[in-house]
Image: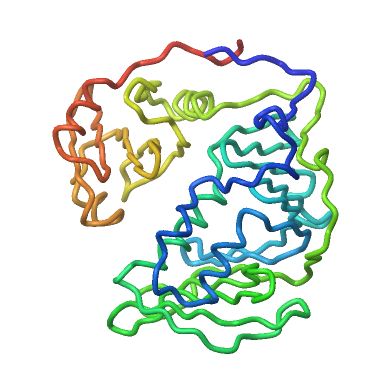
Amino acid sequence: MKTRLLSCIVLAVLASTGPAQVRRFGGMRPIRRFQNVLPILLRAIKAQPSLRYTGTYTTEFKQGANRVRHQEIITRDGVWYRIDFPNDSQFAGQVIVENQTTRLHYYPITNEIMQQPPRHGEAWERVANLANNKKFVLRSAPGEMIAGYRTEQLEVSDIQGNLVQRLFIEPGSGVIMKRQLFDLVGTQIGFFEFSQIDMNAKVDASTFVIKRKNAKIVTPMLQLERIAKRRGFPFRYLPPSSGFLLEGSSFRNFAGVEGLVETYLNGKVRLWIYLLKAPIDPERLRNAGGKNLHVYSFEAGGETTVLMGNVDDPALIRFASMMTVGTSAIGH
């Protein structure tokens, strides 16, 4: 794979029309499939393709024993998003632009633009899945005043009555103003909440263009090669001919066993590949990801490879046989 130094990176070419004309929400199921849905949730789902606003929100998530919190400044026009960060933020200067097909994240320190799959569409698909999922019980109630707007609260619980998440939706626009996520014992593990929002904002198409001289596009495959080289792993991956595209990769330590985790996506189906420096019980990985996942592992060259996903065992074996050792893309 060859990467080039680009004099100009223009995200807008990823769509044939400007953001003001794009009105298909990537990943969203047709509204006609939703039946017997609480009106406030249906309002939020139906509003997604045409939402346009600017605002600032705070997000927090639990990372190990710590809680990580920061502010984001968002500009949205339908499927197009732009995220900036306050000047006093640890992420100041970074810019994220996303549509239904691509997410580009600019890092000023390295003058690089990380190319990744989009995230907002998938997040909204999970919200939409609440509509017909019999594993959840949904209740609505008056919500809080958030950023000067009255909201309606949507409480999501499992069938035993354990709280899973809360959504606070502005009924006029359908904007989710606040979302809280809870763990198995009811502890809040993440949230986001708007502190300011302009629902009548005028958004120019140029907002969604990243233009930076000599910026380098860093693809997921190049990111994988960098991590593999730095951590002493082979540059091994699943080729696109498998039907799965590389989404991202990261280095992990599993109770003393060093590992490289590759995440792949095919539509809504994910596949994880673990390259490990020593043998490990695959059940430990499956228990962390979910018991409905299938696992296949093999050892070669003193390393253990584990494939895990919501596909059957023959498919995992086939994917294992397709894994490729790549040639270097770094420096080209």
The quarter of the picture where residue 161 lies is bottom left
Furthest toward the bottom, the residue is 142
Can you say which quadrant of the picture contains the C terminus?
A: top right
Residue at left offset 78%, top offset 67%: 197
Q: Is residue 239 above or below residue 312?
A: above
For residue 14, side relative to residue 158 (left or right): right
The quarter of the picture where residue 153 lies is bottom right
Q: Position of residue 196 (x, y in %)?
A: 79, 70
Q: Position of residue 260 (x, y in %)?
A: 38, 36
Residue at left offset 35%, top offset 27%: 243
Q: Position of residue 303 (x, y in %)?
A: 25, 28
Residue at left offset 27%, top offset 56%: 290
Q: Is residue 315 above or below residue 330?
A: below
Q: Is residue 221 above or below residue 70?
A: above
Q: How is the image coloured?
A: rainbow
Residue at left offset 43%, top offset 73%: 37
Count of numbered badges drawn on the protein: 0
For residue 285, side relative to residue 20 (left or right): left
Residue sitting nearer the eye, 277 or 220: 220
Q: Position of residue 214 (x, y in %)?
A: 78, 20
For residue 287, side relative to residue 331 (left or right): left
Residue sitting nearer the eye, 299 or 166: 166
Residue sitting nearer the eye, 278 or 183: 183
Furthest toward the front, the residue is 32
